[in-house]
Image (tube, rainbow, N blue to C red):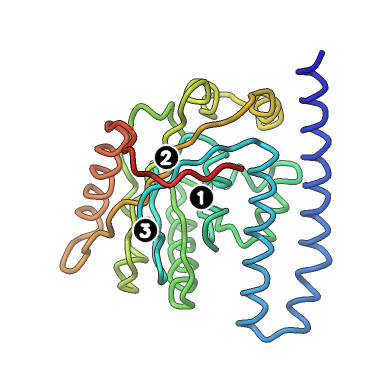
Amino acid sequence: MKLKIRLFYKLFLIILLFVNGCVIAAGVFPVINALCSANNAKTRRDKIKKQWLQRFSSIMRLHIVREGELPKQAAVLVSNHISWLDIIVIGQHLPVYFVAKSDISSWPVIGYLSRQAGTIFIRRGDKKHILETAEKMVWLLKQNNTIVAFPEGTTTSGDEVLGFHASLFQPALLTKSLIHPVAIQYRGIAKEQAPFIGDDAFVPHLIKMLSLEKIEVSLSFLPVINSSGKSRHAVSNEAREMILKQISNDLPADMTVIRA
């Protein structure tokens, strides 16, 4: 009974958070854009988006162990991909734009919020759309923004790193932006429960995650890749190997622990 009450309470908080997100996207952001300069508006929107994701993290009871340096300038962060939770895990630490599969755009509420947050949606296998995605990424990088991409193109159980789509690295090479690999690992019971794979649907998976007492996550910002003189395939393979090596290692003892 106590577990059910806790679940219902967390569901209630999530509903309130989603309503709050819709109000922000439909009402607050347009006002900020109208009253503030472009740079000031972006700073304010970024702050609000980070705070919203931090509240999401708190409700989900994410216990994040972070290692490594956050990027201090425009960069393309490339990460292995396990769950929709990855977006909350990364996005609460720094202002970013995500590259996500187009399916998310049609999700109830989440799709709307993602669009309003500036998420770049990509249709795998559509060469024309992939080119348009690359152009959007180049424009954002030239505006000194940081982008997060999941080059595997799909989610996994977290025990492997699939081959990377090298095309997602081309915008970083064209703009000479930093390429920053990131490794995500779910720990404890979340290692088995967190993966969002196969025919999983968002709402049932959300409820399953809310049922957990806590969700333990390891987030590692790995060393920046020196891309000078390298092809997109070379940097793609190098990033994948770095992430694969990291997820094969045990947690270092000197990580920074961040508890929601």
Crowding near the residue tagged with mark 2, few <14, some 14–19, many ≥20 C-alpha atoms within 10 Å: many
Q: Residue at x 47, y 34 (%)?
A: 82
Where 248 falls versus 13 (above or below)?
Answer: above
Q: Residue at x 60, y 29 (%)?
A: 214
Q: Mark 3 points at which residue?
A: 69
Q: Which of 143 and 52 is in front in this view?
A: 52
Q: The C terminus lies in which quarter of the figure?
A: top right
Q: Which residue is drawn at 46% across and 31% down?
A: 186
Crowding near the residue tagged with mark 1, few <14, some 14–19, many ≥20 C-alpha atoms within 10 Å: many
Where 120 falls versus 8 (above or below)?
Answer: below
What kind of residue is marked 3? Glu
* Quadrant hosting residue 223: bottom left
Q: The N terminus lies in which quarter of the figure?
A: top right
- Numbered disc 3: secondary structure: loop
Residue 184 is labelled as 2
Q: Mark 1 points at which residue?
A: 90
What kind of residue is marked 1? Ile
Q: Is residue 138 left or right of residue 14?
A: left
User: Does the rendering let one see residue 162?
Assistant: no
Contact (Cβ within 8 Å) of mark 1 with mark 2: yes
- Residue 168, position as x, y percentages in the image: 37, 56
- Residue 60, position as x, y percentages in the image: 66, 36
Among the two numbered marks 3 and 2 on one chain, the one whose residue lies closer to the N terminus: 3
What kind of residue is marked 2? Ile
Among the two numbered marks 1 and 2 on one chain, the one whose residue lies closer to the N terminus: 1
